[in-house]
Amino acid sequence: MAITESQKQLVVSSFKKVESISEVAADIFYKKLFEYDPSLKALFKSDIKSQGKKLMAALKLAVGSLNDLDTLVPVLQDMAIKHVEYGVKAEDYTPVGNALLYALSQGLGNEFNHELRTAWADTYKVIATVMRQAAYPNINPDTYTP
C-alpha cells in the first residue's frame, strides 16, 4: 500500500492543527483506546500524560518523515521491536489505529471528512504494516487493519 502525494499533504496539514491541541488529542486517544481494549492499559507503566507526549512526538516524527520513508522505516522497525518488549501484540495495532482515527475526528471536527479520514487510515496502515512486519515477521500484514 502506498500513500499518495495528496494524502501526505492532507495528513501533514491536518497534523499541524492537531499539534496545537496535542495534550487534548492524546487524552482523547488514550481514553478511546482503553475503551476499545481495557487490557491495553496494563501496558502503560508511566504517567499517561507523559505517554501522550511520547505519542505526539512519534506522530510528529512519522508525519514529518512521510516524504522520506527510507529514513522513517528503520525508526519504525526499532520502535516496533521495543513495543514487543513492552508486551504489545500484533493485534493491538488495530485498536490503536481506531483510537487514532477517533481522536483525529474529535480534534479536527468537521474538517475530518471522508478524504482526510482515508488519508490518515492509509498512512496508519503503512506505519502499522512496517511495525508489525518488523516485530512479527511471520504474521501476514493483511491480517489486521484499522
Image (cartoon, rainbow, N blue to C red):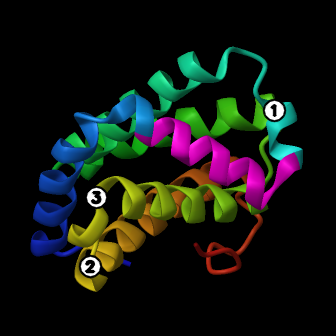
- Mark 1 or 2: in front is 2
- Vertical comparison of 131 with 116: above or below: above
Q: On the image, numbered disc 3 is attached to which residue?
A: 108
- How far apart in space, not on screen, are marks 1 and 3 (Cα)? 28 Å
Say which amino acid is labelled 1. Leu
Mark with earlier residue (1, 3): 1
Secondary structure under the numbered disc 1 in the rendered image: helix
Taken as a whole, is the magenta stretch helix, strand or loop?
Answer: helix
Q: Would residue 119 be found to the left or right of residue 73 on screen?
A: left
Say which amino acid is labelled 2. Asn
The residue range painted magenta reads 25-38
Q: Position of residue 52 (x, y in %)?
A: 52, 28
- How far apart in space, not on screen, are marks 1 and 2 (Cα)? 32 Å
- How far apart in space, not on screen, are marks 2 and 3 (Cα)? 9 Å
Give the residue drawn at x 46%, y 54%: 103
Secondary structure under the numbered disc 2 in the rendered image: loop
Say which amino acid is labelled 3. Leu
Any mark on residue 43, and which? 1
Q: Position of residue 48 (x, y in %)?
A: 64, 23
Q: On the image, numbered disc 2 is attached to which residue?
A: 113
Give the residue drawn at x 56%, y 51%: 131
Q: Position of residue 58 (x, y in %)?
A: 41, 33
Mark with earlier residue (2, 3): 3
Mark with earlier residue (1, 2): 1
Q: Position of residue 87 (x, y in %)?
A: 83, 36
Neighbor class of circle 2 (other Cα within 10 Å; few <14, some 14-19, many 20+) is few
